[in-house]
Image (cartoon, rainbow, N blue to C red):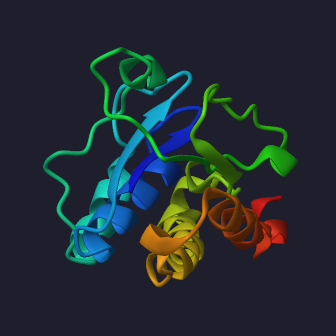
Amino acid sequence: MNILVLCTGNSARSILLESILNHRSGGRMRAWSAGSRPAGRVHPQSLVLLEELGFPTDNLSSQSWDDYAKDDAPRMDAVITVCGSAAGEECPYWPGAPLRAHWGVADPAAAPAEDQPEAFREAFAQLETRAMRLIDLPFEEMSPEDLQTVLDAIGRENAKAAG
């Protein structure tokens, strides 16, 4: 399953979920992340946390969602937005046929600098819980309709944490 994770800046939450899906899925998923207005760099606290947890960080970058709209881009099976729309953020919208889901999480980069390590750990924990729900499914055998229902249900979990 190919998954594109979108957020506005593509420096924190989308990077974390991309890493979780790639690292924890045992090769059953391939995830990429992008932003509608990419920051151009991965947030340093994202890298610190991922390295502390033993996740590879060498191929992570902040990039534009335009890179995935090109003819030669990988075909996506699902697009997941992770911005915290309830907090007033603008979420990117991905047109087309992939399944779409919103898994909003509060922006850890918006926390005061001294609170960011904990905010990033909390965002990671929420995203990992959701990712593992998806990874643990027999998604290869599910109909698109059933998978959409589950993606939506996963997104509603911990929705209050997004703002």
Quadrant assignment, res 49:
bottom left
Residue at screen point 53% across, 54% down? 113
Quadrant where the C terminus is found in the figure: bottom right
Q: Quadrant of the N terminus?
A: bottom left
Residue at point 45%, 59% (across, down):
17
Please indicate, yes or no, whether residue 33 appears anywhere in the rendered image.
Answer: yes
Residue 163 lies, with reference to residue 150, above or below; the image says above
Image side of residue 156 versus residue 107, left or right: right
* Residue at the outermost left position: 58
Please state which of residues 134 and 112 is positioned toward the viewer in this rendering. Answer: 134
| Rendered location of residue 147, percent (x, y) | 63, 65
Labels in figure, total: 0
> What residue is at 61 percent from the left and 27 percent from the top?
96
Image quadrant where residue 22 sits = bottom left
Instruction: Report the side of 99 relative to 47 (left or right).
Output: right
In the image, residue 134 above or below residue 1:
below
